[in-house]
Image (tube, rainbow, N blue to C red):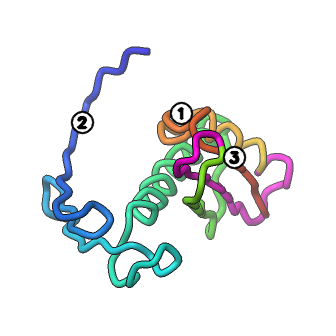
Amino acid sequence: MTVNPVYRVWSTSTGGGRDGEVVSESGRIDLDLRPPVEMGGSGEGSNPEELFSAGYAACFNGALHRMAKNAGVDLPEGSNVKVTVGIGKDDADDGVGLVADIHVTLPGLDAAQAQDLAEQAHGFCPYSKATRGNIAHTVTSSV
């Protein structure tokens, strides 16, 4: 696959990764990172999974809007995308792995149409493409 980027951005992590700081090129992201309580940390900062879920949700929502536009569907007021990212022991290689649960809410649409748009967005979203075959996904919708 060849990608010709029209935009690039960098961020820098310092300290211990999960226990450090991350700053983006623009400076709009400048966060202290701490492991979540569930992983033995203080939970007093953000963490890579939280950042990943935020980026994934925004990207997937953009893909959803594009798929709806292509289908001639106006997304209803109150539509949203929630991406839950989990981290835990990966039995395949005795390491650590991720899972992503994507839930699309499209109030007022037909349930089958909502699920179809969610599946189309999953096929189009760059985050979904990048993680396909690497992490387990679920894609669900509600109306």
Q: Callout 2 environment at 10 Å: few (<14), some (14 to 19), or many (20+)?
A: few
Residue assigned mark 1:
129
Q: Callout 3 environment at 10 Å: few (<14), some (14 to 19), or many (20+)?
A: many
CA distance for labels 3 and 1: 14 Å
| Front-most of residues 19 and 22 | 19
As helix, strand or loop, the secondary structure at mark 1 comes to helix
Residue farthest to the left?
26
Q: Position of residue 125 (x, y in %)?
A: 53, 39
Task: Please name the amino acid that badge 1 sits on.
Answer: Lys
As helix, strand or loop, the secondary structure at mark 2 comes to loop
As helix, strand or loop, the secondary structure at mark 3 comes to helix
Mark closest to the chain's N terminus, 1 or 2: 2
Relative to 53, residue 131 above or below: above
Q: Residue at x 33, y 78 (%)?
A: 45
Q: Residue at x 61, y 52 (%)?
A: 99
Q: Callout 1 environment at 10 Å: few (<14), some (14 to 19), or many (20+)?
A: few
Relative to 10, residue 75 above or below: below
Q: Position of residue 94 (x, y in %)?
A: 58, 47
Q: Residue at x 19, y 46 (%)?
A: 10
Q: Which mark is residue 7?
A: 2
Magenta segment: 92-114
Quadrant of the rendered image containing residue 136: top right
The quarter of the picture where the C terminus appears is: bottom right
